[in-house]
Image (spheres, grey):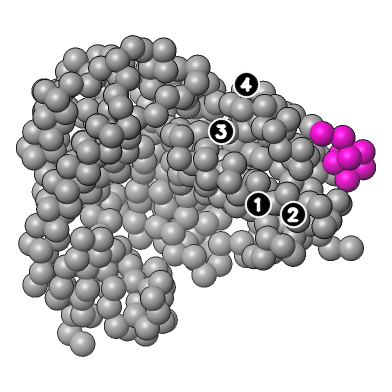
Amino acid sequence: MNKRFHIKTMGCQMNEYDSDFLAQSLIKNGFSPENEVGQADVILINTCAVRAKPEQKACSFLGRMAGLKEKNPELVVGMIGCLAQMKGKELMKRFPLLDFIMGPRELEKIIDIVGEIYDSRQKIAVTGLKGAPPSPVNCPGYFQNQTSGFISIMEGCNNFCSYCIVPYVRGREHFRPPEDILREAEHLLSEGVREITLLGQNVNSYTWDDPDHWNFSSLLHAMGNLEDLSRLRFTTSHPKDLSDALLGCFQKMDKLAGHIHLPFQAGSNRILKLMRRGYTREEYLEIIEKLRTAKEGIAITSDVMVGFPGETDEDFLLTLDLIQQVEFDSLFSFKYSDREGTPAAKMPDKISKGVKVSRLQRLQDLQSSITLKKNRHLEGRQLTVLVEGTSKKGGQLTGRTSANKIVNFDGDSHLAGKLVEVTIQESYLNSLKGKLTGS
């Protein structure tokens, strides 16, 4: 009997990459993907634990699966990823329907684990953190009709920011061999992918063997030499590790997108020190100036949190001031939440929920006004867009500029995967509307 699987992915692009690995592993071993969760024989929940909200969503989804398990006792339900690593055994007690938990360093064992569940129906927990990132599965046909794809170049993090759970649930930094990364890129390109995003908790710390030969900038140059690649992106970078060599990549590489995601988290030096971020606001602003000198018009996005323990009104105002000075293209902003096991979780002077909600709304209102202003400046300009396909609402094509701006416009579907010139007609908060230049 052909078994069907459904993967529910929650969290970041790294989780999307991991879900693709799991899906390809299952397909290569005779399983078939199933869009309807109620029709699946195997349900995998790929989780995130960076903040409280994704954890709550994962538990809510898991609770809804109880009815399916009651109807079909043979159903296999597994939780994978950071939440499984952090609280998996606790969740197995809380949710008896769970058959197994698997940490993010154990993905290569998925076929063995599912097989063992079918054979013995014993609950299994695998949460080792010392394994190297797995080699790609490269399942033929999996990425066909996709314009964009991800490649993980590393696993784990060595920074140990005081609020962050990542080093505890994904382990220490472990890099993939460059030839392994390039081989995976060649496979994606052979499937029709034209834009690749390199992923990692801190991509610009990448090294392999001799750091003078294989570092992040040399990896970018090697990727840029791939003939069928139209555009190259990466995320996420840490400000303290942003090198002059990386700045040079923005100056010299035509295929490297004019966009960087560079989290700053807070605008107060006092809070940055408590966060163990390793830089000051002045150093961050200096990096921004260097980036804008290296690449004219570069889009800069970032992460920021409000309500870190001990954050005063003055600290918060410094964060708003930094946002006003930099004028980010967009921000991922969120309320601080305790992550069990991190130093910040034990810090005194927690900020009330009401204050955090108020501060977040004020910050988001400010950023929305900046984003809209920057988007309006693009009206009338001709921009190069990589066409991704049909827009979510249908009836139009959609794609992204080098600066990662979403553009919707009329055009034929055969343009998917191609670079086209689009004149921007209207701007909105989250997208742009344009017209094919010359049409």
Tell me if mark 1 has few (under 14), some (14-19) or many (20+) residues whose alpha carbon lies within 10 angstroms of its own: few
Q: Nearer the viewer, residue 179 or 145?
A: 145
Q: Amino acid at mark 2?
A: Gly
On the rendered image, what quadrant is the C terminus found in?
bottom left
Q: Nearer the viewer, residue 348 or 111?
A: 348
Q: Residue at left 18%, top 41%? A: 363
- Closer to the chain start, of discs 4 and 1, is 1
Q: Amino acid at mark 4?
A: Lys
Q: Label 3 belongs to which residue?
A: 82
Q: Label 4 belongs to which residue?
A: 130
- Residue 64's disc is 1
Mark 2: secondary structure: helix
Mark 2 → mark 3, Cα distance in angstroms? 25 Å
The stretch of residues the image draws in magenta is: 116-123
Q: Is residue 216 left or right of residue 140?
A: left
- Closer to the chain start, of discs 2 and 3, is 2
Q: Label 2 belongs to which residue?
A: 67
Q: Residue at left 53%, top 45%? A: 57
Mark 3: secondary structure: helix
* Residue 320 visible, this orientation: yes
Mark 2 → mark 1, Cα distance in angstroms? 7 Å
Mark 1: secondary structure: helix
